[in-house]
Every structure is written in structure tokens, then in C-alpha cells.
Image (spheres, grey):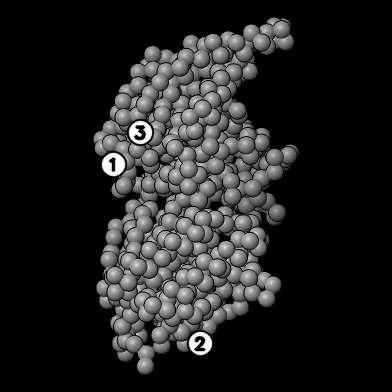
């Protein structure tokens, strides 16, 4: 006889790609905790045993065997009468590899396969898995559970099939990475499936950083009327119990916690901190080292590093040269003091002048130019990498998205490093998040409260200080303008004419477009960094390094507009048709 109550523990946890033994043990501990809570079933996220996304690692037969053996051990442990388990893993069946989700109960294993394999943006699942057949529900102690896996709810076919074949409840395991505005998008998708099917839905997401991706958790439950029955926190691990009751109209979640989820700028900052923390921790670095210049980018990276790892694991180094201003020296020292980190000053004059002396026989008949400026940056990069080699700390690189877009960074210099927490933040967003951090810090952050980025750093004009009185705007448009143009070119893929139509100077837009394309070779060699926007440099945007295309449509657009003004009609075939 089917039961009329059900307690499901939601294990919103941080698994590690490739650490099958560690993930297995984490699942085992979570099941024990769920048993103490009185749960009948404990649910884990997509591909939990393998870690997600494991990319081509899932294609290795030895890895597949290791995951399967771990699942079988966990299945045998369910003969103890405790909670059943829902666990994700790669699964080979009849020669094909699937993204699978397995129900373990009383020693038995029942498997369902993901149907809709995402193959856009950061996802490449069609490269690694075969699509499964449309599934029916799986029976758990007389209750028919529908298990659409992540992308399976982004279209309606899988949920429709489950509803038509008798599912009573939708349990959705996810590996859904964070980007700005994702929370609302998930709710809208889930609500659409609930409305169509008339079934309540559990949306369980993983949490943690994996290379450039950050998974924010923020799992939730919707009842059949689309009311929010449960909300788990973002950016932190938790195991939460949901209590269900079956009435005349089906299953209802009666008891569960509702937590506040950080959104907007706070979510962006928290994502950067978590991404940096997990990259360092999962790669087993003892800490980080970074150059602290007295500028805004290195200051916010230092703050994020301290929030992620604590001040004892962050080493900041000022590397001054003749163009470093007294104000920068003062600002960097104040920032380091506010954060409580180790701070050293290592002048680079001997290194720079040594390079110049070596090159003098070949450079003597030439004018000084950007080459000599870049020697300063490359000397700094070499020193930071030497500190990393000697003491084991990872170098944090500190270039923002505006600079990475237009190549305003020195390859093998300030681009040196293992990871970049602000790689997907435009310059004006860096300023905004720095001001935010001075009045707030995320839950679980290990840094101090209060002002950690001195006001003078926020107020002064950005400069690389590679020559006398240098300002970034000597080479670039004002960042307010540059960022808006770049969003049009990178996030929106707009025509040059479309961006000009928003009020920007045509020559400036064409210059930014050219810089964006010619800097591709630098970005290919840059450190990975946290994805925050819909379109980051990395998995999302894959442009060729060799690329002679430039948008030539602006002249035609101007001609079309002139003709339209003269005739009152758009020309057929114009850019606006």
C-alpha cells in the first residue's frame, strides 16, 4: 500500500570533479544525516558521484567503472532500512554512455537517463553523452517519482511524458551554473512545467566552483499551485528536510525552510569569492599571492581572496618602479593593512634596467615606446611567478573584462597567474562591487567587516603607471562608454551600426571592435576566471584567433538611413529590414 507521507532530504552539496571516492563518502555522510532527520529519501545533484561537469573525463572507461563501483557500494548500504538515495553519474548501457540518475533502495538500482542534452553556451553534453529515451516514473515505496534531469525541464516534452505515464511528483537534479539573473529564469521555467503538468516540483542544484563555472545552489520546491514551499540558500552547502503529504489533489510540501537568496551585485560578488575559493582549495594550493598596485582591480581581488581564504593565506606584494606614485604606495599599504594580509614591497628597478641593458645593443637605434613599458609589467609577472614557484601559493591575476576585451593587459606580465576572480566583470562593475564590499560582505566570508578598499582607490582615475602621468583614458574611451560598447559587441553581438545608433561615435566603436578581435590571442592564453555574465570569455564565446573579419556595414547603414529620410521608406535589404 502506497504511503501518504514522504520526507525528502535535499543534499545541496559541493562535489569535486574526479574525486569519486570523496564524493561517495560525502553522499554516505549526507545519507546518515538524512536518516537522523527522519528522511525516507535523500536527493543529490546531477552527476554527483563524478562531479559536474567532468567533460571528456567521463569518456574514460576507468572513470566510468570507478563511478559505477561507487554507486553499487552505496546501493548495497541501502539494505539497512534507512533512506533511499537518488544519485547522478555517467552510466554505460549497451555500448552507449548516458547522463544518468539512479534510485537506490533496499539494495536495488533503478536508472533513468537525461533526454535533452544542452549543447550551447558553457555546455557540450552532446559531445559526451547519448540522449536517453523519454522516461516513465520510477517507483519508490509505492510512490511514482518523475525524474527529469536538469535541461529536461527547459522544454516540455519530458515532463509531459512523465505526467502522462503516472508521475506524482517531479524531482529534478541540476548542475545549473550561476550567471546574473539566473534565479528568476529558473523559477519561470519550473513554474511553466508545474503549470503544464499539475505536479509539484523539487529543483535541487549543486553548489561550488568548477574551473570558470560557479554553481550557486539556491534549490527550491514549488507546490502544484506554483507556490514556493522551500528555498535553500545560495553559495553554501546545506542538507534540508522537506515533509510531504498526499491529499485528494496530490502531493503537497507541508514543511520546509525558506531562506533568503542573494541576488544582483551581492550574488555576483559571492560567486567570485566562491569560485576563487574552490579553485584554490580543489587544486590544493596553500594560498595565493598577488601584486597590489594601489589600483581598484588588485584591491578588489585582494578583498575577494581574503573573503575566500582568510588573511593568513593571502600574500600581497607591491612592485614599484619610478612611475609608481606616492599615492599608490600609500593606498596599497592601507588596503593591505585593512585586509590584515602579509604585505611586502619589492622594487623592480634593478630587474627592469637589467632587461633594458641586455636589450640595449638591439634597441639603441630605436625610440622608447610601449615595449619598455611592458618590460615593467613582465618584470612584475616574473617576480610573482617566482614567489609562487618558491612558496607554492597560486598567483591571482587581476585584469577586468574591459581590459581583457581590448587587450589592455600585458601577456606574460600582469596577465600571469592561475585564476582571475574578476575576469567577467567590466571596469565599472569592479568599481560598483568595491563600493558594495565596503558596506557589506557575503555570509561565510573570512575577511574583516567595514571598509577594506580605501576611498582614495575608489576615487582616483585608473592608471597602469607605466609612464609619467599615464591614465587609462589616454588609450581607451572612458570606461562608462567603453563598457557599454563592449556589452553590445560581446554580450549582444550587435552590428557596429546598431551600437552607433545608441549614440556612440562611429570611429570609437570601430576602434573598440578592432581591439576586441586582435586581442583574441591574448585571451586564449589568459587564466580562467569566474563566469558572471551570460557570455564570458572562455566557454561561452569561441572566436578564432586568426580572424580578418571587420563589420563593414556602417557605411551602408548611413546610406540606408539617408534614403529612408528622403523617401520615408526603408530600402529593401537594408540593415533595418
**Which residue matches tag 2?**
165
Q: How many marks?
A: 3
Q: Position of residue 401 (x, y in %)?
A: 51, 38
| Rendered position, 341 above or below 192 | above
**Which residue matches tag 3?**
312
Which quadrant is home to the C terminus?
bottom right
Please state which of residues 13 and 544 is positioned toward the viewer in this rendering. Answer: 13
Mark 2 neighbour density, 10 Å: few (under 14) some (14–19) many (20 or more): some
Name the mark nearer the viewer: 1 or 3: 3
Marks 1/3: CA–CA distance:
21 Å
Please state which of residues 79 and 264 is positioned toward the viewer in this rendering. Answer: 79
Q: Earlier in the sequence, mark 1 or mark 3?
A: 3
**Which residue lies at the image location 31% right of the left edge and 47% below the top edge?**
444
Q: Earlier in the sequence, mark 3 or mark 2?
A: 2
Residue 440 - label: 1
Please state which of residues 23 and 117 is positioned toward the viewer in this rendering. Answer: 23
Name the mark nearer the viewer: 3 or 2: 3
* Snapshot quadrant of residue 286: top left
Q: Position of residue 178 (x, y in %)?
A: 46, 54
Whether residue 474 sits left or right of residue 186 in the image: it is: right
Q: Position of residue 331 (x, y in %)?
A: 35, 22
**Which residue lies at the image location 34% right of the left edge and 87% below the top edge?**
3
Q: Residue furthest bottom?
A: 1
| Rendered position, 415 above or below 154 | above
Amino acid at each position: 500500500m502506497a504511503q501518504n507521507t514522504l520526507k525528502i532530504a535535499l543534499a545541496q552539496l559541493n562535489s569535486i570533479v574526479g574525486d569519486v571516492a570523496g564524493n561517495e563518502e560525502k553522499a554516505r555522510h549526507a545519507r546518515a544525516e538524512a536518516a537522523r532527520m527522519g528522511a525516507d529519501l535523500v536527493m543529490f545533484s546531477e552527476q554527483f558521484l563524478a562531479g559536474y561537469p567532468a567533460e571528456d573525463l567521463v569518456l574514460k572507461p576507468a572513470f566510468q567503472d570507478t563511478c559505477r563501483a561507487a554507486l553499487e557500494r552505496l546501493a548495497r548500504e541501502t539494505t539497512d532500512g534507512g533512506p533511499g538515495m537518488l544519485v547522478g553519474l555517467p552510466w554505460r548501457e549497451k555500448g552507449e554512455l548516458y547522463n544518468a540518475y539512479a534510485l537506490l533502495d533496499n539494495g536495488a538500482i533503478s536508472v533513468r537517463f537525461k533526454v535533452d542534452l544542452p549543447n550551447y553556451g558553457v555546455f557540450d553534453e552532446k559531445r559526451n553523452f547519448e540522449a536517453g529515451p523519454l522516461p516513465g516514473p520510477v517507483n519508490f515505496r509505492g510512490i511514482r517519482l518523475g525524474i527529469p534531469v536538469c535541461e529536461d525541464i527547459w522544454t516540455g516534452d519530458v515532463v509531459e511524458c512523465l505526467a502522462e505515464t503516472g508521475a506524482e511528483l517531479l524531482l529534478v537534479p541540476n548542475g545549473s551554473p550561476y550567471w546574473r539573473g539566473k534565479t528568476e529564469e529558473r523559477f519561470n521555467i519550473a513554474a511553466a512545467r508545474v503549470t503544464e503538468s499539475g505536479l509539484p516540483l523539487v529543483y535541487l542544484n549543486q553548489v561550488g566552483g568548477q574551473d570558470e563555472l560557479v554553481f550557486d545552489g539556491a534549490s527550491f520546491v514549488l507546490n502544484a499551485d506554483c507556490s514556493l514551499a522551500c528555498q535553500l540558500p545560495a553559495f553554501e552547502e546545506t542538507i534540508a528536510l522537506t515533509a510531504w503529504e498526499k491529499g485528494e489533489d496530490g502531493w503537497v510540501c507541508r514543511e520546509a525552510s525558506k531562506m533568503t537568496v542573494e541576488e544582483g551585485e551581492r550574488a555576483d560578488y559571492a560567486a567570485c569569492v566562491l569560485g576563487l575559493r574552490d579553485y584554490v582549495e580543489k587544486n590544493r594550493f596553500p594560498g595565493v599571492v598577488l601584486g597590489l598596485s594601489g589600483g581598484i582591480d588588485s584591491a578588489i581581488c585582494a578583498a575577494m581572496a581574503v573573503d575566500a581564504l582568510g588573511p593568513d593565506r593571502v600574500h600581497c606584494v607591491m612592485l614599484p618602479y619610478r612611475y609608481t606614485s606616492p599615492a599608490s604606495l600609500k593606498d596599497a599599504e592601507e588596503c593591505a593593512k585593512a585586509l590584515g594580509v602579509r604585505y611586502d614591497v619589492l622594487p623592480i628597478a634593478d630587474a627592469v634596467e637589467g632587461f633594458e641593458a641586455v636589450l640595449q645593443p638591439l634597441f639603441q637605434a630605436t625610440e622608447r615606446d610601449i615595449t619598455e613599458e611592458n618590460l615593467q609589467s613582465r618584470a612584475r609577472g616574473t617576480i610573482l611567478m617566482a614567489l609562487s614557484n618558491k612558496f607554492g601559493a597560486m598567483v591571482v591575476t587581476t585584469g577586468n573584462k574591459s581590459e581583457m576585451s581590448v587587450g589592455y593587459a600585458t601577456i606574460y606580465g600582469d596577465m600571469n597567474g592561475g585564476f582571475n576572480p574578476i575576469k567577467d566583470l567590466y571596469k565599472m562593475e569592479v568599481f560598483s562591487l568595491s563600493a558594495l564590499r565596503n558596506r557589506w560582505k557575503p555570509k561565510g566570508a573570512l575577511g574583516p567587516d567595514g571598509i577594506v578598499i580605501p576611498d582614495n582607490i575608489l576615487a582616483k582615475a585608473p592608471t597602469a603607471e607605466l609612464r609619467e602621468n599615464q591614465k587609462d583614458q589616454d588609450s581607451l574611451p572612458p570606461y562608462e562608454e567603453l563598457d557599454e560598447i563592449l556589452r553590445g559587441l560581446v554580450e549582444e553581438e550587435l552590428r557596429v551600426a546598431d551600437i552607433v545608433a545608441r549614440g556612440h561615435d562611429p570611429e570609437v566603436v570601430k576602434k573598440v571592435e578592432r581591439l576586441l578581435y586582435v586581442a583574441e590571442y591574448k585571451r586564449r592564453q589568459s587564466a580562467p576566471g569566474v563566469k558572471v555574465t551570460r557570455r564570458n570569455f572562455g566557454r561561452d564565446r569561441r572566436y578564432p584567433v586568426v580572424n580578418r573579419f571587420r563589420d563593414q556595414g556602417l557605411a551602408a547603414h548611413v546610406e540606408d538611413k539617408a534614403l529612408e529620410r528622403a523617401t520615408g521608406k526603408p530600402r529593401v535589404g537594408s540593415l533595418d529590414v
